[in-house]
Amino acid sequence: TGSCKNCNGNPDKTVDAAKKCQVLSSKFIDDSATCTASCKDSFASKCCLCSNGDVVYSRTGSCKNCNGNPDKTVDAAKKCQVLSSKFIDDSATCTASCKDSFASKCCLCSNGDVVYSRTGSCKNC
């Protein structure tokens, strides 16, 4: 219903549920377990590759330090996931872990060109 009664009506953050979990949607599935799992994905912590080449860790997955528009994202390591029982709450460690996620790559582009990508994004293909 959107009231967040399990948070006593006072959530830290909200995002719209997936279309299949919207009560007014023609695709509504009425499956709380599936929709809860889908919601947890919405709050996954991310590693963000910004357009300037910076790699940042985002607890919320919003990548706001990339102005909310990263070139690429990957899920942060389990220990850096806010919803994980193994969460360490250490931005420096998680940022270092994120930098490993975007290792430099040699890229074979669809046109046959081979390019080196310092950040692993292969955006020059």
Image (cartoon, grey):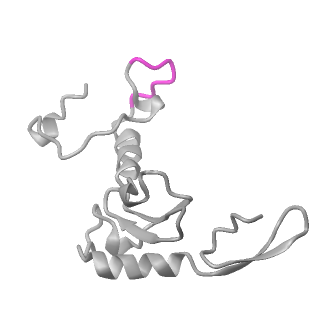
Q: Residue furthest left?
A: 8
Image quadrant assignment for residue 22: top left
Whole-percent x and y of residue 71? Answer: 56, 59
Left or right: 4 as drawn, with respect to 86: left
Magenta: main secondary structure: loop
Residue 117 magenta-highlighted? no
Seen in the picture, residue 63 relative to 122 is either above or below; the reply is above
Whole-percent x and y of residue 121? Answer: 64, 68
Q: Residue furthest front?
A: 52
Left or right: 31 as drawn, with respect to 26: left
Q: Quadrant of the N terminus?
A: top left
In front: 2, or 125?
125
Q: What residue sits 41% from the left and 42% below the top?
A: 34
Whole-percent x and y of residue 97? Answer: 42, 80
Q: What residue sits 58% from the left and 81% below the top?
A: 103
Bounds of the magenta span?
24-30
Q: What residue sits 28% from the left and 63% below the top?
A: 82
In front: 77, or 123?
123
Whole-percent x and y of residue 84? Answer: 30, 66
